[in-house]
């Protein structure tokens, strides 16, 4: 048997072995003479193993060894005799040496652990209907009412139900007889409720439910506080499972009490097999639908349909990455074999979890690769001329020279534009890195070659600003620009539309309005999308549908971590402007509370005296728009009357008429307004280099990326700038210990983490990584808002490595079968189209 190659195993594994072997070796030394001096080996080994498995995905053989190492130390101090301890230590030492020598890697373990028998395939003459076509509504025991509840959890079909993974697991595999309970341990007991008594302490509005559970060996108490509804559930005579920590009562060991954190009412023999005596899956619940019901449903779905799950992954891919077959993965992820490591389950890193996550990522990456390939095969109707006269002229007119990074990115864009293939490129560059001027070059090159170009931005204010800065430059090189937004006078708008249609207007700058029905370009050759993250994924198809086939350049100021970039922008070529223009000083960032308000105004006042300008930013969210707007208006009023009576204070918010907004912005740019009070309308793009101080009110209500963007409005000139975050947190809730997701407690802690991250760092990349970590991938940058479907098994933070593998495999697959026509890829292709076709506008493959 050839020795399998595991190059990636070595380093983390070596580090692990190095850490673990030393204490064990020491304990073994001199005929175990030091055994008594080495303490807490059990915890140490367990933590190390879990840590190692969490950090790195090892080959199955190594994983098995690591888990058996951990098992050697279970109950090490509580149950084992000294002789047994010595024996375990010797075994552990041998195992570690074996791993060090790489022996276990030589013996290949089976690719697929076969702990579980796949459910029997029902006998039937007809081929079974595919599971994605089986509506959950017609499943036995579901019905119309529950269908609605399940839909709330994102489940409409049998397939979706099977892919709804538990969010954690409880280990109820060992049921302890009551007589064997030991105070201090966490145990699971099963028995009959022989007494259930509820008392109410009227004065304190406290309700107590005292339950006695008896099994064949004894009786134990469990007490529940303030959960009156449990009286209905935990009734005398009922059979229950309860689990939690065992504590000694007033009479010590004579009356043990169970601090039950979980319980389950058992109603039949089947129940006992499903809800206890195993590792039990815990699902997300919704009102009217419990985790337990989900468990029952999934158990029966698996029995009936588990055998009909389609294997989407090619065998070779599965073998290479040791991924179990789909039926087994789904079975194991819901009802894991009893020897599965609980922490690996909870972290979602078991072989079954990995397999499911890989499938999702693989389908997505293949879809992305296909789309990119399609694009590469397209031919555009025109080529752009790098020698165009206006382009040369532009170099003479620019007030500054490009930074090296701008130069490089511009060359990359130029290289795309001169070929016959359409450009589909993303420019990433932190706030203030100077993306506009790079876009300007592309606009000039397109128009200089006889085409029209469009610059699309997310807000009217930004459109206006770009128009004001770019128009003079464009005109100086002989090009004509128009502004096209949603609002504006009909007559003027008409004229602009006419110019665009005739081709007289060469550059059109505007909002979404640019790609609306009424707008017709004569010869659209380039579309630049600025601040792309605010738009959602631009469907290139929208442009194609209108009969255009332009080059597309998207720009974003929010640097996103590589994993997300691969997911969201998987089919774009990426350029990065990783350098700020010379002379920029990092913005000093301060975190103040309301008590330091006077200091804030003092700092602002100092800047104003020095001739600089200031932004005061107020949050504005839709749900509380009226109140927020009032706060901003009041804030402006106060500043005008009380704080800075001698300066001009302007107000800017989304509800103002376009003309008024334009006026205010222009006045601020010209310096006739010194303080601009604004809502988040100024979040993106706005560029007034003389503004050097920004105060962000209620900073705790903003997202991290948003704060970074806002802060980017200052520090755009040579002057030292600062950003003052005014934070007021919601008061801590008295006595709240638990902090489930979405509670005031988590909100508070997330807000604190966000603000601290912002004070610490100026690097958009670091901030984005931090944001991803705090919020998790679903919420990060509003993946949902982008119309990206959620993953069911994959997690972009956890599965970065898996994503990379999936990407490689996907491109290998397409290299072999570019149009997915081979018969063995049909199931895969079907699954990919089902999941991604609508979202990614896959054209020719379908
Ligand atoms: P962003 O990448 O955030 O869109 P902008 O394009 O608005 O950044 O540029 C920020 C500021 O930097 C603008 O005032 C712009 O004129 C200036 N700028 C851009 N490139 C350079 C450069 N190479 N040298 C000096 N200033 C520059
Ligand atoms: Mg910009």
Image (spheres, rainbow, N blue to C red):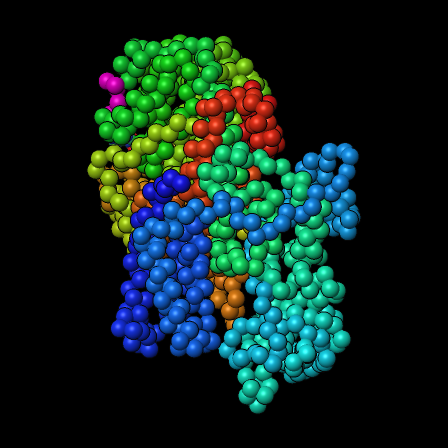
Residue extending furthest left?
583
| Span colored in magenta | 395-400
Q: Please state the horizontal and vertical placement of residue 623, each as a whole percent of the image.
A: 57, 48
Quarter holding residue 558: top left
Residue 137 visible in rendering: no
For residue 570, above or below residue 385: below
Q: Residue at x 62, y 64 (%)?
A: 277
Q: Residue at x 40, y 41 (%)?
A: 1
Q: Residue at x 49, y 62 (%)?
A: 745
- Magenta stretch encompasses residue 399: yes
Q: Please state the horizontal and vertical placement of residue 257, each as a whole percent of the image.
A: 59, 80
Q: Please state the horizontal and vertical placement of residue 9, each as a whole percent of the image.
A: 35, 47
Q: Is residue 740 left or right of residue 717?
A: right
Ligand 1 image position (quadrant): top left
Q: The C terminus lies in which quarter of the figure?
A: top right
Q: Is residue 402 left or right of residue 550?
A: left
For residue 360, above or below residue 751: above
Q: Is residue 585 left or right of residue 753?
A: left
Residue 49 visible in rendering: yes
Q: Residue at x 67, y 66 (%)?
A: 264
- The one of 12 and 577 positioned closer to us in this rendering: 12
């Amino acid at each position: 048997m050839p020795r399998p190659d595991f190059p990636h195993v070595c380093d983390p594994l070596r580090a692990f072995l190095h850490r673990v072997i030393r204490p064990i070796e020491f304990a073994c030394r001199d005929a175990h003479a030091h055994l008594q001096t080495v303490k807490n080996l059990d915890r140490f080994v367990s933590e190390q193993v879990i840590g190692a498995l969490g950090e790195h995905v090892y080959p199955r053989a190594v994983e098995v060894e690591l888990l058996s190492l951990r098992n050697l130390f279970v109950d090490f101090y509580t149950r084992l005799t000294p002789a047994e301890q010595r024996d375990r230590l010797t075994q552990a030492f041998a195992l570690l040496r074996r791993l060090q020598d790489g022996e276990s890697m030589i013996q290949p373990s089976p690719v697929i652990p076969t702990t579980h028998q796949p459910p029997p395939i029902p006998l039937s003459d007809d081929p079974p209907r595919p599971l994605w076509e089986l509506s959950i509504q017609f499943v036995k025991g579901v019905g119309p009412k529950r269908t609605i509840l399940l839909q709330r959890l994102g489940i409409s079909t049998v397939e979706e139900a099977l892919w709804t993974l538990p969010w954690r697991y409880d280990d109820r595999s060992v049921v302890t007889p009551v007589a064997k309970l030991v105070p201090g341990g966490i145990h699971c007991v099963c028995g009959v409720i022989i007494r259930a008594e509820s008392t109410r302490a009227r004065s304190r509005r406290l309700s107590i439910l005292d339950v006695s559970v008896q099994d064949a060996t004894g009786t134990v108490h469990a007490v529940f506080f303030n959960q009156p509804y449990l009286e209905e559930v935990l009734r005398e005579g009922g059979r229950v499972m309860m689990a939690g920590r065992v504590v000694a009562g007033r009479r010590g060991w004579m009356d043990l009490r169970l601090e039950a954190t979980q319980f389950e009412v058992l109603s039949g023999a089947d129940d006992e097999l499903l809800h206890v005596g195993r590792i039990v899956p815990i699902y997300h619940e919704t009102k009217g639908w419990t985790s337990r019901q989900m468990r029952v449903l999934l158990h029966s779905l698996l029995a009936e349909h588990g055998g009909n799950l389609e294997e989407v992954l090619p065998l070779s891919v599965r073998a290479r990455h040791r991924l179990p077959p789909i039926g087994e993965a789904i079975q194991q992820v819901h009802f894991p074999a009893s020897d599965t490591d609980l922490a690996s389950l909870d972290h979602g890193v078991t072989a079954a979890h990995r397999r499911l996550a890989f499938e999702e990522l693989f389908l997505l990456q293949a879809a992305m690769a296909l789309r990119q390939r399609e694009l590469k095969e397209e031919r555009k109707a025109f080529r752009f001329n790098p020698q165009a006269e206006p382009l040369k002229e532009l170099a003479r007119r620019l007030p500054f020279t490009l930074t090296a990074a701008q130069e490089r990115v511009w060359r990359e864009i130029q290289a795309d534009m001169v070929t016959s293939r359409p450009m589909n490129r993303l420019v990433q560059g932190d706030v203030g890195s100077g993306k506009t001027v790079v876009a300007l070059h592309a606009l000039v090159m397109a128009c200089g070659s006889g085409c029209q170009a469009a610059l699309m931005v997310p807000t009217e204010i930004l459109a206006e600003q770009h128009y004001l800065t770019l128009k003079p430059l464009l005109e100086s090189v002989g090009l004509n620009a128009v502004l096209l937004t949603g609002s504006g006078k009909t007559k003027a708008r008409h004229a602009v539309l006419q110019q665009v249609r005739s081709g007289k207007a060469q550059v059109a700058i505007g909002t979404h309005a640019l790609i609306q029905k009424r707008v017709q370009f004569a010869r659209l050759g380039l579309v630049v999308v600025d601040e792309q993250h605010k738009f959602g994924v631009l469907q290139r198809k929208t442009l194609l549908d209108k009969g255009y086939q332009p080059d597309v350049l998207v720009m974003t100021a929010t640097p996103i971590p590589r994993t997300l970039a691969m997911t969201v922008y998987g089919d774009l070529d990426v350029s990065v402007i990783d350098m700020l223009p010379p002379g920029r000083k990092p913005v000093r960032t301060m975190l103040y509370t309301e008590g330091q308000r006077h200091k804030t105004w003092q700092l602002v006042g100092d800047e104003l005296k020095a001739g600089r300008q200031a932004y005061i930013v107020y949050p504005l969210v839709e749900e509380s728009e009226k109140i927020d707007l009032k706060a901003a208006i009041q804030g402006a009023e106060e500043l005008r009357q009380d704080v800075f009576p001698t300066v001009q204070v302007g107000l800017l918010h989304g509800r103002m008429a376009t003309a008024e907004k334009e006026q205010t912005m222009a006045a601020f740019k010209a310096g006739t307004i010194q303080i601009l009070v604004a809502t988040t309308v100024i979040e993106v793009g706005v560029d007034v280099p003389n503004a050097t101080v920004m105060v962000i009110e209620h900073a705790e209500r903003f997202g991290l990326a948003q704060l970074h963007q806002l802060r980017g409005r200052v520090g755009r000139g040579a002057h030292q700038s600062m950003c003052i975050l005014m934070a007021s947190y919601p008061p801590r809730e008295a006595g709240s210990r638990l902090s489930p997701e979405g509670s005031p407690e988590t909100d508070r802690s997330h807000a604190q983490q966000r603000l601290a991250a912002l004070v610490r760092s100026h690097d958009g990349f670091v901030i984005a990584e931090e944001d991803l970590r705090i919020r998790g991938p679903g919420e990060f940058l509003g993946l949902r808002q982008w119309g990206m479907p959620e993953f069911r098994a994959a997690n972009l933070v956890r599965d970065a490595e898996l994503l990379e593998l999936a990407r490689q495999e996907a491109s290998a697959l397409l290299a072999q079968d570019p149009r997915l026509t081979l018969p063995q890829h049909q199931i895969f292709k079907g699954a990919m189209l089902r999941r991604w076709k609508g979202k990614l506008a896959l054209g020719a493959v379908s």
